[in-house]
Amino acid sequence: QVQLVESGGGLVQPGGSLRLSCVASGIIFSIPAMGWYRRVPGKQRELVATMPTGNGGNYADSVKGRFTISRDNAKNTVYLQMNSLSPEDTAVYYCYAAVRKNYNSASFDYWGQGTQVTVSS
């Protein structure tokens, strides 16, 4: 089994910053991709940022220039640095990981439980 545990959410004022972390544990051979989605009640889940094993990240247009995704592959951890936060960023943020359990298996997606980010004055 694979588990993802997020941390770092909370309440922040507009213009502030937060850093989310997500650690994957369990039977893991490799993690081809990790990333973050978010969901606002009543709306569809939205991709925030994803990152393959190597360098480089893909971002939603709404967060480009404000959010930065990074990974520590040795620790099976993905981070999301969020700067210049606005009330529109308020959502539950979910970590995901595409995990391969052995060298000849396909990857499967696993999800964390979510962490609430609230941007309000």
Image (spheres, rainbow, N blue to C red):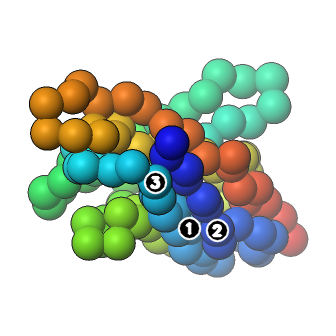
Instruction: Establish if 105 lies above or below 116.
Output: above
Residue, x 65% and y 22% (percent of image)? 44
Of residues 84 and 75, the one drawn nearer to the viewer in this rendering: 75
Residue, x 55% and y 50% (percent of image)? 3
Instruction: Establish if 90 lies above or below 74.
Output: above
Q: Is residue 15 visible?
A: no
Of badges 1 and 2, the one in the foreground is 2
User: Callout 1, which amino acid?
Assistant: Leu
Task: Verify CB contact (< 8 Å) between mark 1 and mark 3.
Answer: no
Mark 1 vs mark 2, CA separation in Å = 6 Å
- Bin the neighbour count of mark 3 within 10 Å (Cα to Cα): few under 14, some 14-19, many 20 and up: few
Q: Which residue is mark 2?
A: 7
Of badges 1 and 3, the one in the foreground is 3
- Bin the neighbour count of mark 1 within 10 Å (Cα to Cα): few under 14, some 14-19, many 20 and up: many
Instruction: Answer with mark 1 or mark 3, whichever residue precedes in sequence.
Output: 1
Of residues 65 and 46, the one drawn nearer to the viewer in this rendering: 46
Total marks shown come to 3
Q: Is residue 45 visible?
A: yes
List x then y, in percent, for residue 58.
Answer: 28, 45
Q: Which residue is mark 1?
A: 20
List x then y, in percent, for residue 113.
Answer: 69, 46
- Bin the neighbour count of mark 2 within 10 Å (Cα to Cα): few under 14, some 14-19, many 20 and up: some
Task: Verify CB contact (< 8 Å) between mark 1 and mark 2.
Answer: yes
Task: Verify CB contact (< 8 Å) between mark 2 and mark 3.
Answer: no
Q: Secondary structure at mark 1?
A: strand
List x then y, in percent, for residue 27.
Answer: 39, 49
Residue 26 numbered mark, or none: 3
Q: Is residue 75 left or right of residue 4?
A: left
Residue, x 83% and y 64% (percent of image)? 120
